[in-house]
Image (cartoon, grey):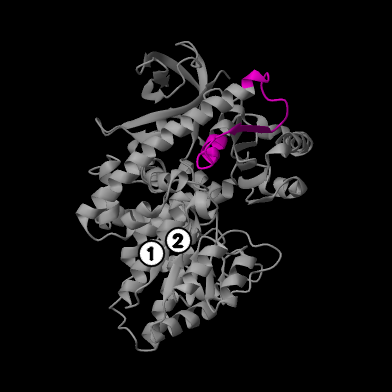
Amino acid sequence: MNPVASRWILATPDASNVEALRNGLGLRSATAAVLIRRGAVDPARAAAFLNPRLSDLGDPAGLRDIRKAVDRTVRAIESGERVCIYGDYDADGMTATALLFDFFGRVGLEVRTFVPDRALDGYGVNADRMRDLAADGVTLVITVDCGVRSHDEIAVARSLGTDVIVLDHHEPGDTLPDAAAVVNPHRADCTFPFKGLAAVGVAFYFAGAVRRELITLGRIAERAVDLKPLLDLVAVGTVADVVPLLGDNRVFAWAGLKILNDGPRVGLIALKAVAEVDGRPVTAGTIGYQLAPRLNATGRLSNPRASLDLLMSRDPEEAKRFADVLNRENEERRRVEQDVMARAIEQVEAAGGPKHRALVVAGVGWHPGVVGIVASKLVEQYRRPTVVIGIEDGVGKGSGRSVRGWDIGRALESLSSLLQRCGGHPMAAGLALDASRIDEFAAAFGELADRTVPEEALIPSLEIDATVSLGDLDRGLADELTRLQPHGMGNPEPTLAMMGVKLKETRRVGRDGSHVQVTFEDGGRTIGGIWFGGADAAPAPGSVVDVAFALGIDDRTGGTRLKVKGMRLP
């Protein structure tokens, strides 16, 4: 969070709802306020949020076309057909592919797997790869994390006698491809109540539906195939794809993190080791910042096969070799990313800073595998929607990231006449265009943003879940807030605020002195904390301040400690 956020947004939950959670569940007011902000506005929903259970997961029967997908798959199992799982080159697509490989092995069907090479095959389903699979005798392809917009490619497969089942979670176009089944929670005719699934979640529900049908047909015993060991993959893919950690996804992340901590598959054990997180509790943050970047690195820079093979491996020594490859690729990804980031910033500053409410930067040789990461960092730095484009052989391939309140996917669609292709979501999108049109696109994108990006979206802000007094900050509140984990998109780490407390002491820390240790005092009580990156923004000791923070537990003392997110003078 920006240490100098100039706008604080304080939540004002309905007092009667807060009181209902306090009385019904025996919670602190601050915890109740956070739960209400997460949509748990009554005791029943709050209790489900605090105590996630696998039995809370939805019924896959609500997913449109799931029956068609199951029937076609069971026919393939019974006939011993050649089946290929066709995934994507990111962590969500690869965990979904590995999950189905594992599942089908458990029910006695040997399947092939394929994940595309970003440079050779492009994103999504590739028509030439479909021809290759058909030539090799594959009669059923199950796509995961891709396919919902692959009309032409699926038509090619069908013309060659290969059926396609699409398991995807991306927004469909106006029409669906002519596949044997299209299972996607975002289908307009889908009644499944939770729309925010990652592809690995869709794959898990599909596996569950196939399992149920095989049990009904007497093909497998009910206890013979347990789906719970697949949940480590579901947690990794769900967290890595930055989908909301609410509803079904919260259950998936909670259950999968238990397995990741207690006994994951050998590939994830090896990945934890090279990421140097083995022996420590694995959290959603561990997945997002340590494990997922390594899984994604191969698909960003080279061929993602090593990441998929790691997830499918059953041999510890083999898994270690794959994990070492991922670690090396991740180091190279960091180097390439830092180089592109430096050049992008240089380009912006050389132009005198941003001229519009959006940024477009482009460069020859900028690796397409890192432009999305660089776009995210530029959004954070300049606080405006950003598109970063790498140019090669006269073609620009780019990735865009947005700010809350502006749909970059829709924005690109409105400029599609300037582009060869585009697609995406409100917060992230991709595009390709002729390099000669980049300046024209940048001007049009900037003008569109100037008209439509809300002013408040450009202002750094802190969203405060609840206000508290210093006397409220005891171990009991910290323990209650811990129950709100795992944190991520849709369920961020709770941000609390104290108003009008004395900043008693400050002390710069860190190798470059950019962090500051702080002590606050109010009513004779004190509490300590740290503000990462806030040394230059901290008021002078003795000042009366408002402070926004996350409440944590000090590993050394067992007491409470603050992670400061912002300070201001009242």
Q: Residue furthest left?
A: 317
Residue 19 on image: x %, y %: 52, 49
Q: What's the magenta region?
A: 349-376
274, above or below 197, in the image: above
Residue 443 among magenta residues: no
Whether label 1 touches label 2, CB < 8 Å: yes
Residue type, mark 2 in image: Val
Q: Residues within 10 Å of mark 1 (few under 14, many from 20)?
A: many
Residue type, mark 1 in image: Leu
Q: Residues within 10 Å of mark 2 (few under 14, many from 20)?
A: many
Q: Which mark is residue 200?
A: 2
The quadrant holding residue 445 is: top right
Residue on which disc 1 sits: 99
Residue 445 appears left or right of 530: right
The quadrant holding residue 326 is: top left
The quadrant holding residue 394 is: top right
Residue 195 appears left or right of 524: right
Q: CA distance from mark 1 to mark 2?
A: 8 Å
Residue 449 on image: x %, y %: 74, 36
Q: Which mark is residue 7?
A: none
259, above or below 387, in the image: below
Q: Is residue 248 visible?
A: no
Classify mark 1: helix, strand or loop: helix
Residue 244 on image: x %, y %: 52, 52
Of the pair 245 and 374, the residue shown nearer to us: 374
In the rendered image, which quarter contains the C terminus?
Answer: top right
Of the pair 251 and 470, the residue shown nearer to us: 251
183, above or below 77, in the image: above
Residue 475 on image: x %, y %: 33, 37
